[in-house]
Image (cartoon, grey):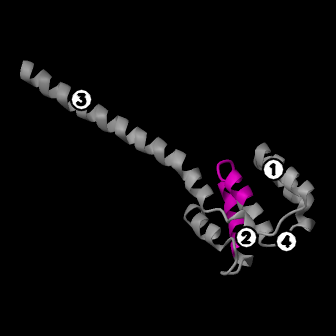
Amino acid sequence: MSKLIGVLIIVAGFWGFFQILRLYNKTKLESEGPQKVQQVAAPADALPALSPALEASLAQAKAGGADAMKDWLAANQPYLRDPRKAAIELDYARLLVRSDPAGAKRIYQAVKARTPADSPVADQLKGLGRLFE
């Protein structure tokens, strides 16, 4: 009887260890996902600059989250041109992916459809492809 209890304790220990390992890997992947997406961003010097007022309001909108970015894009759409517009919309898609994955995918596909292969944001599109396709 004591051998059976010993075997059960060992089996329970292994099971607990693998459950903890699985949970660790899951949380590690969830925390690394956004970081890996951020690493594929286009270099800032490769994109055309915005006016200082637009840069400041864009930084505030990014800090405000997906809703603030949506409002900022709606208000400043006429002042944006590709490839900077594409990069900003991809930033918005990244913010939107947790709350509205379908909307983020629509934005990604719209940017992908109008972006040529030699664009400065092409690498960013390729990196985000795994997330949205």
Considering the whole magenta stretch, tell me its main secondary structure.
helix
The residue where tag 2 is placed is: 46
**Lateral position of residue 74 relative to residue 32, left or right:** right
Q: Vertically, is 22 above or below 82?
A: above
To which quarter of the image does residue 86 belong?
bottom right
CB of mark 3 within 8 Å of CB of mark 1?
no
Please give the range of residues in magenta: 91-112
**Lateral position of residue 32 relative to residue 5, left or right:** right
Question: Mark 2 or mark 1: which comes first in sequence?
Answer: 2
| 2 vs 3, front mark | 2
Residue at 41 percent across and 39 percent down: it is 24
As shown in the figure, which amino acid type bears the numbered disc 1? Ala
Residue at 82 percent across and 54 percent down: it is 70
Quarter of the figure that contains the N terminus: top left
Mark 4 element type? loop
To which quarter of the image does residue 52 belong?
bottom right
The residue where tag 1 is placed is: 59
Tell me where residue 17 appears, x and y as whole percent: 30, 34
| 2 vs 4, front mark | 2
Q: Vertically, is 72 above or below 3?
A: below
For the residues labelled 4 and 1, the Cα–Cα distance comes to 18 Å
